[in-house]
Image (spheres, helix red, strand yellow):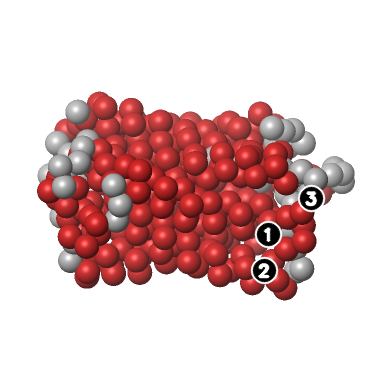
Amino acid sequence: MMFAGVVWALIAGVMLGLYALPEKYTKGYAYENTWGLFFILTMFVVPVIASYVLLGGLQVFGMVDSSIILKMAIASVLWGTGVMMWGKAINHIGLSLGFSLFIGTVILVGSIIPFFVNGIPPSNVFMTVLGGLAVVLAGVVLNGNAGLVREKDEKDGDAPGNETGGSMLTGILIAIVGGLLATGFSFANAVGAEPLGAAVAELGLAPWKTAVAVMFPIFISGGVVMGLYFAQQLTVKKRWADFKTVHVVPNFFLILIMAIFHYTASALFAYAASKLGDAGNTVGYAIFNASCVCTAIMSGIITGEWKRASGRAKALLYAGLGCMVIGIIIIASGNGLG
């Protein structure tokens, strides 16, 4: 069962690492159009459809103490704010570095939060997992340095057509603060998984559908923040008319793919965590997010984000990627000790 949980966490991470890739191929949309439509689809449309189809409606949420849903909602508002900042960071510093810093922060803080909700595991598990997180931290630092070196390379070379407009330092700060806020997802999942799982079982539904139930209050609550923000941005910047571009149909389907990948990845993480035992939320969260970073870095390299970077910048990036992989292995091994 533990092995299955690790595999599902890895698959979920790969999906999350790839979800933003279609954004590079939308046409005629400003940042506000692409991400505004994405958040509406992924936070409201996809979860509502998934919940009605897989849970047979929303009655499962009336079977749980309202205080549980309230705690999940508050934490999810913080998560929604963090994810919104994540999208902005990617616009500043690119896909690979934006994912690396944001998710790295999420891993380091979010992986510890479940310990305070579910209790500290045996000391050998706890210390090994912390060791793995330290290795991930080294990867975050290396990737941050790689981004700063890349920015200097591009400025020194006066490289035209830099695809990641904005200050690198600003983008890094946005990504880190966003990552801290986004750890609300980990808290909401840790708080809601057990009571919602019991409600799902009482309804006679398959246990894996608990993941769908957990995602609904998280996504709806987080989506409120994002919806309001992008409605305001679209109005202030007069971007509503841009939705009428001749590319509206292909753009919609590209963004729908992003939304489905994002939602499915999050639900698969919740399922994986349930298969990983007592430390499942911590271990699953770390594996899920670290594999996401690795995937995002590779996709950023393949799409040419680092083609103008020096050998030193790339060496730092690859070293950071290596730390992420090693950290995943140590964290997974630590869970096995339990």
Q: Amino acid at mark 3?
A: Thr
Q: Quadrant of the N terminus?
A: top left
Q: Secondary structure at mark 2?
A: helix
Residue 98 screen position, x and y as percent: 58, 48
- Name the residue at 17% across, 60% down: 63
Q: Earlier in the sequence, mark 3 or mark 1?
A: 1
- Quadrant of residue 275 within the rendered picture: top left
Return the residue nearer the eye: 246 or 31: 246
Q: Amino acid at mark 2?
A: Gln
Look at mark 2 in the image and give the residue it sits on.
233
Q: Earlier in the sequence, mark 2 or mark 1?
A: 1
- Contact between marks 2 and 1 (CB within 8 A): the answer is yes
At label 3, counting other C-alpha atoms closer than 10 Å, the crowd grade (few under 14, some 14-19, many 20 or more) is few
- Name the residue at 35% across, 38% down: 268
Q: In the visual, does 87 lie left or right of 206?
A: right
Image disc number at residue 32: 1
Look at mark 3 in the image and give the residue it sits on.
245
- Contact between marks 3 and 1 (CB within 8 A): the answer is no
At label 1, counting other C-alpha atoms closer than 10 Å, the crowd grade (few under 14, some 14-19, many 20 or more) is many
